[in-house]
Image (cartoon, grey):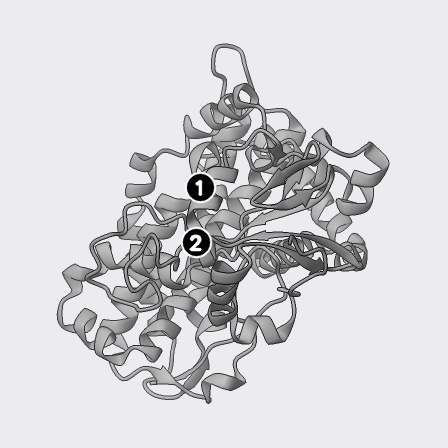
Amino acid sequence: MATTEPQIDFTSPAFKKNPYEILANMRRQNPVAKISLPGDRTGWLVTRYEDVETLIKDPRLSIDIRDVYPPEVIQAVFPFGEVSEGLLHSMVFSNDPKTHSRLRNLVSHSFTPRYIETWQGRIQNIIDEIINQLPEHGEIDLIREVAFPLPMIVISEMLGIPVEDREKFRDWSNSYVDSLGNPAAAQAIIGDMAEFQQYLFELIEAKRANPSDDLLSKLVSTDVEGDRLSRQELIGMTLLLVMAGNETTTTLISSAMLTLFQNPEQKELLKQNPALLKPAIEEFIRYQGPLLNLNDRWAVEDFEYKGQQIKKGESVYLCVASANRDEERFQNGNSFNVQRSDLQRHVGFGLGMHYCLGAPLARLEGVIGLHTILQRLPEIRLAVPEEELTWRPSIITFALEKLPVRF
């Protein structure tokens, strides 16, 4: 019989402390499960790889809330004025292939894999400068001192964000991500988002008036056969690039280091064989990657799936953290192995047309950052018992609050 009572609250500290055992049980017993969501809401969590792969292409689910709800409901979920409008008009929330293709084409005109590769030397310089500023030995929060500054400096330099604004940008970005799917959290940061909106207005207009050789100036001036990004689209794209360029890599580096602390023999293997790191980055993403779930999918009609009755307007979360450990897809999926061979179809950065735009940059920064940390801080280790670690409350990302280390 299909269950109708919520099975889990995956925003709770209890879940964040022990997610993979819980998710493994759900894959076996209840792979399409009713779950609790913030604001006394419920939704659905999909945990098997096969179902995630199937439903991400299912036309009965939309990534665009505008396909399901009227403006007044959307305003309650995304109450941030033009910041929300910008993101809703970005590729992340575009369900129409033609619209998505247009936006991706305009952005990809400047943000190409070849362009990203040109940053390899600068990324190495940045991580070296960050580690040069650390004490010779001591205890630090690896996230605040290393894992955050690296991608934030890189994406700030790429976009042309002034040095003095980087901390603010990080705080705004983190607040926005943590509020997704949580109406109460969204209401609490309306003032911050109004400030963020004004900042983005002024930054875009400054680039329009005085363009330079940064990515945002290029996006402002990009013209493909007479088509240009609107102000709303530029706001959404800037926010998307900051989230993709900061959130993803910060979480990738910190989660990867925690994984190595948990698997010391694999840590030694990477220290002794740095050439393994580039392919191993896919195992880090599969095993404990930056994403817990893909962004909400919204049911555009009532339908039945695997015995569960999904109603129009309900949220459906495709759990990539679970799919990437599904034993039906990955042999010994709960074990971490940097020499694993079956990694080509992990879903750590999504699938299809919504595959993460920032994935090539995250991979490059991850490889360079992890290699440099392991080589220059060879004695690095966790500074607190693992059970004392805490996780951010986001529904979408799976990110540590802090990672105290000694070296």
- Image quadrant where one finds the C terminus: bottom left
Residue 379 visible in the current orientation: yes
- Amino acid found under the numbered disc labelled 2: Ala
Residue 153 visible in the current orientation: no
Residue for point 71% across, 44% down: 314
Q: Position of residue 223 (x, y in %)?
A: 50, 17
Residue for point 46% across, 36% down: 215
Q: Nearer the viewer, residue 132 or 389?
A: 389
Instruction: Report how many numbered discs are placed on residues in the image.
Output: 2
Q: Position of residue 83 (x, y in %)?
A: 70, 41
Q: Position of residue 137 (x, y in %)?
A: 34, 88
**Left or right: 38 as drawn, with respect to 231:** right
Q: Which residue is mark 1?
A: 53
Residue for point 22% across, 60% down: 277
- Amino acid found under the numbered disc labelled 1: Glu
Q: Position of residue 142 (x, y in %)?
A: 43, 74
Q: Which residue is mark 2?
A: 323
The answer to which image quadrant residue 377 occupies is bottom left
Is 94 situated above or below 183?
A: above
Q: Nearer the viewer, residue 103 or 31?
A: 31
Q: Check contact, mark 1 vs mark 2: CB within 8 A.
A: yes
Q: Which element type, helix, strand or loop, lies under badge 1?
A: helix
Res 227 label = none
Is 178 situated above or below 105?
A: below
Residue that extends furthest to the right in the rendered view of this protein: 72
Q: Nearer the viewer, residue 284 or 54?
A: 54
Circle 1 crowding by C-alpha within 10 Å: few under 14, some 14–19, many from 20: some
Distance from Cα at disc 1 to Cα at disc 2 = 9 Å
> Nearer the N terminus, badge 1 or badge 2?
1
Q: Which element type, helix, strand or loop, lies under badge 2?
A: helix
